[in-house]
Image (cartoon, helix red, strand yellow):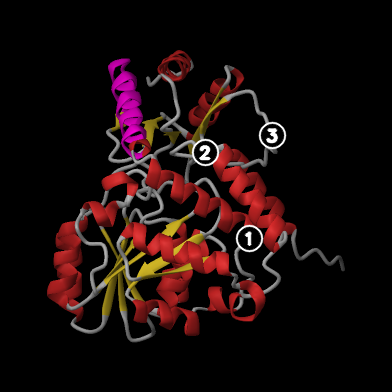
């Protein structure tokens, strides 16, 4: 009798291949030789000399790794400095840095709720929020996308302790959540509001202070934000921002903080360098948004279907998963890297090219990118 406990993997692989959903790792060289509209380097800072120098200096001073969890040896003066400056920049009382934005979302959702709570989650939320809801032991109600009335009704029907959670800018289509209306719905129900500002920091708000600052909600007693250091700040890691008592609670209860190795000093130093650069050059935030609108206008004028961006993500629809994959490959062959979103990454089942607007793109680069996307577009019939 043969023992083959993983034969089911071959069946799953065949089903993925038949559906055109196979994913492949493609290690890139340091200099890829293509125009990158696939990453999330919204402000063009990941290779900025000040940012890379800050990362290198931190590694030389503090070492390659943090050496342990934050509660053992993994907290450095550099981490504390980054937390103070993040909180101040975004308008919150306190901040706590994690090894990733994913870990930050898991921490906030699992440590701030429990088995007797209700979490109301937008249908378009990121996978890290979905996983945090599952791990929280709370009852989770998934409501229609960007629908404050549905949030209000769901909270009102529950009547107990509750938290609503949403992305500030949704990573698939680049549309923004109706944060003021969501905040009112939560306030009326006595519920907390958790906002993942991964795609808002550095792009929205005055000088890139984020979606909550733009909505006048930063620092509110019932408001908690999560964010990533890997997009606009060009580094690695994540953070939770909120009232000081919330942050203290996370230090004592969040498993992805207590049991995870602290963020590497180079990542903390790079993020801090990027944050300070953004303070000095706040025009980068407006430039990223302007590039996104420019890309959208040119692509729709050429007859493609694209969602009008609220921040720096431009989503262009494809007729099928296979067509999206081929389209992205054709763009790469022409010297342009674009994102390709297919099921199950997209909740509505519609495949897309996902473009990242960057503050450092020139007019010639924008024109070249649009020309490539249009010329390689698959037939829609």
In the image, residue 168 above or below residue 162: above
Kind of element beneath mark 2: loop
Q: Residues within 10 Å of mark 3 (few under 14, many from 20)?
A: few
Give the Cα distance between marks 3 and 1: 21 Å
Quadrant of residue 93 within the rendered picture: bottom left
> Which residue is identified by label 2?
39
- In the displayed structure image, the side of residue 336 where residue 241 appears, left or right: left
Q: Nearer the viewer, residue 243 or 311?
A: 243
In the rendering, at what x and y percent does residue 166 appear? 31, 60
Q: Residues within 10 Å of mark 2 (few under 14, many from 20)?
A: some
In the image, residue 78 above or below residue 58: below
Kind of element beneath mark 1: helix
Quadrant of residue 269 within the rendered picture: bottom right
Kind of element beneath mark 3: loop
The label shown at residue 30 is: 3
Q: Nearer the viewer, residue 41 or 128?
A: 41
Q: Looking at the rendering, in which quadrant would you find the C terminus? A: top left
In the rendering, at what x and y percent does residue 318 appear? 41, 29
In the image, residue 380 above or below residue 246: above
Q: Nearer the viewer, residue 169 or 349?
A: 169
Give the Cα distance between marks 2 and 3: 14 Å
Residue depth check, mark 3 versus mark 1: number of the one nearer the observer: 1
Q: Nearer the viewer, residue 63 or 227?
A: 63
Query: Can residue 232 be seen in the rendering of this structure?
Result: no
- In the displayed structure image, the side of residue 248 where residue 53 appears, left or right: right
Task: State the extent of the magenta-drawn residues as a range.
Answer: 285-305
Identify the residue at image location x=28%, y=40%.
Answer: 310
Magenta span includes 140: no
In the image, residue 324 above or below residue 110: above
The mark nearer the N terminus, 2 or 3, is 3
> Which residue is identified by label 1?
265
């Amino acid at each position: 009798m043969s023992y083959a406990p993983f034969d089911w993997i071959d069946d799953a692989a065949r089903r993925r291949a038949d559906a055109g959903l196979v994913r492949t790792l493609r290690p890139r060289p340091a200099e890829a030789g293509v125009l990158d509209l696939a990453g999330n380097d919204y402000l063009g800072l990941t290779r900025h000399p000040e940012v890379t120098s800050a990362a290198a200096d931190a590694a030389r001073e503090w070492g390659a790794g943090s050496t342990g969890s934050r509660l053992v040896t993994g907290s450095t003066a550099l981490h504390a400095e980054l937390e103070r400056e993040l909180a101040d920049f975004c308008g919150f009382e306190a901040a706590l840095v994690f090894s990733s934005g994913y870990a930050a979302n898991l921490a906030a959702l699992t440590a701030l709720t429990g088995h007797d709570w209700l979490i109301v989650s937008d249908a378009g939320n990121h996978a890290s929020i979905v996983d945090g809801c599952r791990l929280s032991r709370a009852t989770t109600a998934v409501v229609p996308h960007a629908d404050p009335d549905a949030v209000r009704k769901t909270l009102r029907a529950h009547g107990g302790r509750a938290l609503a959670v949403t992305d500030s800018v949704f990573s698939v289509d680049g549309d923004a959540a109706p944060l003021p209306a969501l905040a009112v719905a939560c306030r009326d129900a006595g519920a907390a509001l958790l906002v993942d500002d991964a795609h808002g920091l550095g792009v929205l708000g005055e000088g890139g202070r984020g979606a909550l600052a733009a909505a006048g909600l930063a620092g509110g007693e019932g408001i908690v934000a999560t964010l990533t250091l890997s997009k606009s700040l060009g580094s690695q890691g994540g953070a939770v921002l909120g009232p000081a008592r919330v942050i203290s609670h996370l230090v004592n209860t969040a498993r992805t903080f207590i049991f995870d190795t602290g963020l590497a000093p180079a990542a903390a130093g790079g993020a801090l360098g990027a944050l300070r650069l953004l303070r000095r050059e706040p025009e980068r935030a407006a430039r990223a948004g302007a590039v996104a609108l420019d890309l959208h206008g040119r692509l729709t004028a050429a007859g493609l279907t694209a969602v009008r961006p609220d921040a720096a993500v431009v989503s262009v629809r494809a007729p099928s998963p296979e067509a999206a994959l081929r389209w992205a490959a054709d763009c790469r062959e022409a010297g342009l890297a674009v994102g390709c979103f297919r099921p199950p990454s997209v909740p509505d089942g519609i495949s897309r090219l996902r473009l990242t607007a960057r503050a450092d793109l020139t007019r010639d680069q924008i024109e070249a990118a649009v020309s490539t996307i249009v010329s390689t577009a698959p037939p829609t019939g």
